[in-house]
Image: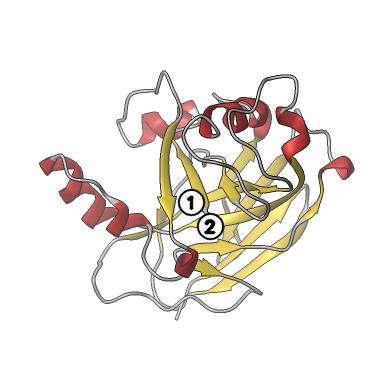
């Protein structure tokens, strides 16, 4: 099982971090050990002092395929959920300054909080709204209609490089509003108004 992540897929998020808007999907990976499921608490790692949340819509791959063509890409995912891409921003910034890969800032243990999954057919696939609350306050509001690279295109693009396999997850990008967390914070993720992530920082 692979966790495939797409960076800077909302223009406002790229701008808030002073990053250029990409011309192609920015792809990175998290290992399976990054998964944190069933609303278990997240324990703040001791190697960072600037841990950020990033709420994203997650696609669950439902069949194997490589070099998926545009007419078939929609058939490779039938369920969606939400995920939190935890990022050690201080480590990421240091890696970027040196031109180094930044997986250690993104792929550490339990850095991929993932909700349960729900049938895509229950939603308007062209406009899915989602929201993050931190300690009861709304900090991120997203709508998949604002994606730079849409779901189907992500399937086509990623499958050029990695064989998609049943059960793989694709984090599709985060909107503006990312920010730091500290021990004691409470994060809640909502998909079309329904809370499906409940994560306490310990």
Tell me which label, 2 or 1, sits earlier in the chain: 1
Residue 11 position (above or below residue 1):
above
Q: CA distance from mark 2 to mark 1?
A: 5 Å
Q: Residues within 10 Å of mark 1 (few under 14, many from 20)?
A: many
Place residue 195 in its image quadrant. Answer: bottom right
In the rendered image, residue 76, in percent from the top left (x then y), is placed at 72, 38
Q: Secondary structure at mark 2?
A: strand
**In this view of the protein, which residue sits in the foreground, 168 or 82?**
168
Residue 23 position (above or below residue 43):
above
Place residue 98 in its image quadrant. Answer: top left
> Would residue 88 be visible to someone looking at this image?
no
Left-right relation of 85 to 99: right
In the rendered image, residue 153, in percent from the top left (x then y), is placed at 61, 25
Count of marks placed on residues: 2
Residue at figure coordinates x 78%, y 47% from the top left: 192
Pointers 2 and 1 in contact (C-beta within 8 Å): yes
Left-right relation of 136 to 42: right
Residue at figure coordinates x 26%, y 77% from the top left: 46
Residue 59 position (above or below residue 161):
below
In the picture of the structure, the residue carrying the numbered disc 1 is 54
In the picture of the structure, the residue carrying the numbered disc 2 is 84
In the rendered image, residue 180, in percent from the top left (x then y), is placed at 38, 59
Q: Residue placed farthest to the right in the image?
A: 122
In the rendered image, residue 126, in percent from the top left (x then y), is placed at 75, 28
Residue at figure coordinates x 25%, y 66% from the top left: 49
**In this view of the protein, which residue sits in the foreground, 12 or 166?**
166
Residue 202 position (above or below residue 49):
below
Q: Quadrant of the N terminus?
A: bottom right
Q: Secondary structure at mark 1?
A: loop
Left-right relation of 159 to 79: left
């Amino acid at each position: 099982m692979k966790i495939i992540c797409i960076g800077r897929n909302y223009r406002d998020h790229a701008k808030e971090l002073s990053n250029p808007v990409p011309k192609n999907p920015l792809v990175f990976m998290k290992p399976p050990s990054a998964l944190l499921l069933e609303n278990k608490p997240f324990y703040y790692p001791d190697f960072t002092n600037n841990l950020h949340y990033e709420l994203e819509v997650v696609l669950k791959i439902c069949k194997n395929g490589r070099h998926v063509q545009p007419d078939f890409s929609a058939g490779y995912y039938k369920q969606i959920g939400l995920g939190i891409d935890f990022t050690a921003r201080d480590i990421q910034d240091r890696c970027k300054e040196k031109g180094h890969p930044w997986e250690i800032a993104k792929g550490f243990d339990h850095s991929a909080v993932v909700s349960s999954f729900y049938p895509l057919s229950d939603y308007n696939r062209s406009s899915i709204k989602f929201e993050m609350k931190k300690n009861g306050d709304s900090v991120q509001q997203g709508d998949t209609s604002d994606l730079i690279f849409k779901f189907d295109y992500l399937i086509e693009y990623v499958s050029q490089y990695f064989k998609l396999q049943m059960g793989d997850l694709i984090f599709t990008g985060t909107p503006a509003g990312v920010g730091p967390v500290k021990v004691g914070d409470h994060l809640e993720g909502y998909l079309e108004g329904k809370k499906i992530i409940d994560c306490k920082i310990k």
